[in-house]
Amino acid sequence: MPAPARGPFRCHAVASALHWLTTARAGAVLRDIHRLLDDDGALMLAEPVVPLAPFAPGFGQWKARQPPRYEHGSWTAFWQRANELTGYDHTQLLGPREADRIGDRMTVRDWTGLAEAAGFRIVDVLWRDADGVIVAAQKTRS
């Protein structure tokens, strides 16, 4: 087994992974990333989001009128092909879904707050759509 990463790193990217964790575990991962980054290093994260509560009813009505963006069949087909190419079942690595995992219940504000709580002082939203966000966060010199 290879030795764990020791850093420092200039940039770290996380895409659609943190929402599989609990909020506490995701925060711990972000703190580890912050620790392993160079001064002025950057974090990029892409995760699913929901609107803030006051906007949720209108958002839900609008979203219901939009064509579906994702189909479970597409996700299944992707992983089936990946499994064929690699010779093992990646979906078995997901393990059981914890009841208190993040899932798709965090807002943009929640994700930026989690990055700030991990020690990142410069946090910005680079992209947002109806279902997801890309957040950039920079570690600043202490």
Image (cartoon, rainbow, N blue to C red):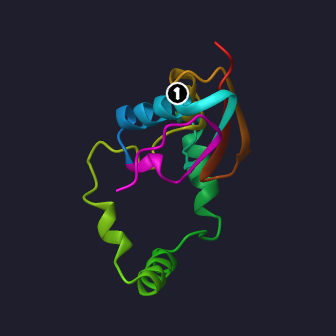
What's the amino acid at mark 1? Answer: Arg
- Residue at 55 percent across and 21 percent down: it is 119
Residue 67 spot, x, y in % from top left: 64, 70
Say which quadrant the N terminus sits in: bottom left
Q: Residue at x 47, y 80 (%)?
A: 82
In the image, residue 9 lies in the stretch drawn in magenta? yes
Total number of numbered discs in the rendering: 1
Q: Residue furthest right?
A: 126
Q: Is residue 54 left or right of residue 86?
A: right
50 or 86: which is nearer to us? 86
In which quadrant of the rendered view does residue 124 lie? top right
* Magenta span: 1-20
Question: Which residue sits at x=66%, y=45%?
Answer: 134
Q: Secondary structure at mark 1?
A: helix
The answer to whether residue 45 is seen in the rendering is: no
Q: Is residue 100 above or below residue 32?
A: below
State the residue in front, 4 or 140: 4
Mark 1 crowd level (few <14, some 14–19, many ≥20, 10 Å Cα): some
State the residue lying farthest toward the top.
142
Residue 92 percent across, percent down from the top left:
29, 69
Q: Can you say whether 76 is above or below 52 in the image?
A: below
The residue depicted at 56 percent of the width and 70 percent of the height is 70
Which part of the image, by quadrant, shows the C terminus? top right
Q: Which residue is mark 1?
A: 35
Locate residue 23 relative to residue 54 in the image: left or right.
left
Is 129 placed above or below 85 here?
A: above
In the rendered image, residue 70 lying in the magenta stretch gets the answer: no
Residue 102 appears anywhere in the view: yes
Give above or below for 6 relative to 75. Answer: above
Expressed as whole percent of the image width and height from the top left, the position of residue 23 reads: 39, 35
